[in-house]
Amino acid sequence: TKARRRFLCSNRKQVEEGLHSRDDSLIPSGIDCFGEDESEMVGLSDRYMTIKDRITNKLSPSARMAVSLRGMAGIGKTAIAKKLFLDPLISTHFDRRAFVTIGPKGQFEDVLLDILKQVNRGVDENIVLMKGEGKLNGLKRMVQGRLTESRYFIVLDDVWVMELLYQLVDLFPDNNNGSKILLTTRLEQVAEIANEHCRYDIRFLDKRESWDLLRHKVFDEMPCPIELERAGKKIAENCEGLPLLIVTVAEFLSRAEKTREYWNMVANDKQNSVFVGAYDQMSKVLYPSYNYLPQHLKPCFLYMAVFPQNYKIPRSKLFNFWIVEGFLELACSPDYSANQFFESLVSCSLVLVHKWSGVMKTCSLHSSFWYLCNQEARKSKFFHGLKSLDDGLAEESLESQRRLCIRNNVLFGIKDVFDSMASVSMVRSVLCTGPYHQYPVPIYLGLKLLKILDALTIRLYEFPIEVLNQVQLTYLAITFNGKVPSSISKLWNLEYLIVNRHLSIVKSDDGNSSYLPTEIWDMKELKHLQVMGSNLPKPREGSFLPNLSTLLNVSARSCTKDVLERIPNLQKLGFRNEVAPDNNADQPLRFFDCVSDLRELKILKCIIVNPIFKNEVASPLFPLSIFSSNLYQLNLSGFGYPWEEMKKISSLPKLEVLNLRCYAFRGPKWEVDRREFPNLRFLLIEDTDLVHWTTDDDYCLKELMYMKMKHCYKLKEIPRKFGLSVQKIELIECNPLAEVFIDGGYSESSFIRE
């Protein structure tokens, strides 16, 4: 994106100042994944052969070509580049070759000198002795002269700075003879100097490849003792597919006792000394990725480590924390800024993203980065993690901390720890990220400056009245089955109120029941209200919530026209209803009569829990066509609409994500016109009685990128072709007859069956 490019190109001086603050000249940038004889790569051979074919293909255009390898530090970019450079076919294919490791501090003059030494078999001593502009111009002339009229292969390893890369690429002559430039980088924008079909993202190793690499590094050509194999595979899996971590762990294992007891101990604890030692070594390689970030992105990155190791962080929750903490720029909307900051972190190969139904829903840190972030956070007192009794009693560590991350909720129940928190006067955020604790423990709330309290992992039996004294509180998230008191309105700064129930389903049969007090309408700063299964109270005359943009998990019956009219800027709405056996099953459908006035609505999630269907498929009471034309995402579950009703939403111009679960639509046949759903990119259909899905043309859903069908046991027919943008089609536990219609039309990587 343009914003990402601006971030990576801007303010080089600031970046270089940060890089020069740490002496990392001896830090290795790559990892050797070769065998002893360098004849075979472990885990990366498939990618290697693809790139080799690209570089040596005589049928490729004769113009000079750039090829880029991108990925996280230690993933094997340099290993592939070295192997390609030394490959006999490549060495005979090109007249001149050079391999230069640049790094974050690389200088144009030094790189030219290194290249010249390799392509010229030496350098004119007079040029070496020259100084300033004369020396640089001399080097440029000699490099250009040696490469002109030659077919050359230049490897630029570990490239960071775009300006330097452009200087080099502009200098290298285009002889129209098939010369190639291969570069490795951690940065997406650097990789984009290559044409799209010449960019390669290096993947993580899978479980089998990880074990092959670990076994090879520990035992070389000798077999692994059978009693160590199970633990060894678990150790390899715990390295999460990163070759450098696997090799580093293997070095520790090679020097340690090779017994089943020891290997089991390592396998069952990622905080074992083997992994901690490996993470420490890894940090030297990973640190430049963190240090490269401009100052405004560093706190956003470090904040991801408050969550547990390997935890899949909901992206929306992370964004909310960033917003409340004040990390974002105020020049544009907070959500837009958060998304741009997040994309910048992803583009630097720092963050792993996870998709659900094709949409980026969660993210995580590789354990190596998680460890680095915790180390940096501890040094800078960005946050303090409490997991053990010692952590809770170390008053010198707690002093001046602004954020406490409680990774073991039981610590609250220890009096000494509870008392030591009384001395922490500067804390602004308390984040309880430990495993869910269903038994009550006291939470210390005597923190006058508290802005964020996230205690969803602690079950509260009573509403914590003490929290009402925290007038600075902006974010409150608790698990509590009772009623929210009317005095909640004392928290006049509160922007986020999230109340989960201990049980995920809360019956709301009684139309008079309400978990939310009428005073909720007095809380004008509210932006996000999420109270599971609750009714919204009727507003007083003149009451409204001008800043509320997200309303989730409320009951449908309380979302009346009068209520929704008082929330003029609502963009995300989700309701959840359980239909009791004696209730009118059509009642929740009346909800759609009220959403027609929500013209700003972008995301709508509607769930009917335990739906009751009649034998015949009936039409809904209100048409689906009343949805906002701005709707981007629609989730429906349990409504039982006939498939014909899909036509009423098929013309929504901005709809990109459609999730249909639990018989959202029913009936044996769905016919799709090729003009329907003009911008739909992601489609999920889960649990349906659909038999025939047909189209009136050769293809349908022309913009579809990702489709997932799950538990469609009756499905026999689906369209053979979708649009040209399809990246992945998944059929999970579906009728095998459906596979016949698309098998052969897509590559193995894009068509997945389970």
Image: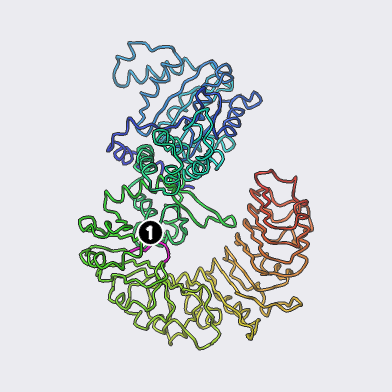
Region rendered in magenta: 430-436
| Residue ID at (54%, 87%) | 510
The percent coordinates of residue 623 (x first, y second) are 67, 75
On screen, residue 552 above or below 243 = below
- Residue nearer the viewer, 88 or 650: 88
The percent coordinates of residue 267 (x first, y second) are 45, 46
Q: Is residue 643 left or right of residue 243?
A: right
| Residue ID at (45%, 29%) | 157
- Residue nearer the viewer, 127 or 726: 726
- Residue nearer the viewer, 373 or 556: 373
What residue did someone put label 1 on? Answer: 322
Q: Amino acid at mark 1?
A: Trp
Q: Is residue 356 left or right of residue 551?
A: right
On screen, residue 181 above or below 719 = above
- Report whether residue 20 is seen: yes
- Report whether residue 5 is seen: no
Where on the picture, by quarter, is residue 306? bottom left
The percent coordinates of residue 659 (x first, y second) are 62, 63
**Mark 1 crowdedness (10 Å alpha carbons): few <14, some 14-19, many ≥20:** many
The percent coordinates of residue 632 (x first, y second) are 57, 63
Q: How many marks?
A: 1
Q: How is the image coloured?
A: rainbow
- Residue nearer the viewer, 245 or 88: 245
On screen, residue 76 above or below 265 = above
Label 1 residue SS: helix
Q: Is residue 453 magenta?
A: no
| Residue ID at (59%, 55%) | 358
